[in-house]
Image (cartoon, helix red, strand yellow):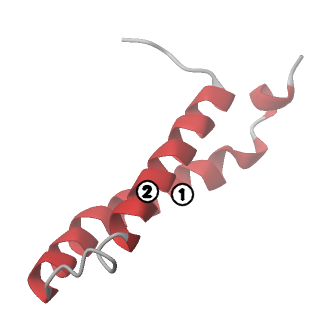
Amino acid sequence: MVEFDGPARRRYALYRSYLYLIMMVETVPRAYGGERVARVRETVAPLLTAALDEIGRGAHTPADHSS
């Protein structure tokens, strides 16, 4: 398994957040029905929240600021 440093973990969390936001927003122009929208929200919203929490937790790690 590959170990990532703090900045790499933050970038990965940012990429995931971006993907999850796209997945949620795209339900509108694609005109998904109510059940499908609910399924996307139920699946993606917790993943988005977890990724954003990860970004928030890592915002002040000392390892990220070392040279």
Residue 42 x/y as whole percent? 23, 72
Tell me what residue is drawn at x 86 percent, y 22 percent: 66
Q: Are marks 2 and 1 in contact (CB under 8 Å)?
A: yes
Tell me if residue 1 comes above or below residue 31 in the rendering: above
Query: Is 30 left or right of 17, judged from the image as shown?
Result: left
Residue 50 image label = 2
| Residue 53 at x, y percent in the picture | 54, 57
Of 3 and 29, the residue lying toward us: 29
* Quadrant of the snapshot with the N terminus: top left
Residues under labels 2 and 1: Cα distance? 5 Å
**Between 56 and 45, the one nearer to me in the picture:** 45
Q: Residue furthest left?
A: 35
Residue 2: x and y, percent?
Answer: 43, 12
Q: On the image, which quarter does residue 46 sit in?
A: bottom left
Specify the amino acid type for callout 2: Ala
Classify residue 9 by image quadrant.
Answer: top right
> Could you say where residue 63 lies in the image, as x and y percent from the top left?
76, 26
Kind of residue sitting beneath label 1:
Asp
Mark 1 surroundings within 10 Å by alpha-carbon count, few (fewer than 14), some (14 through 19), many (20 or more) = few
Instruction: Give SS at disc 2.
Output: helix
Q: Is residue 21 left or right of residue 55?
A: left
Secondary structure beneath disc 1?
helix
- State the residue at coordinates (52%, 36%): 12
Q: Which residue is mark 1?
A: 53
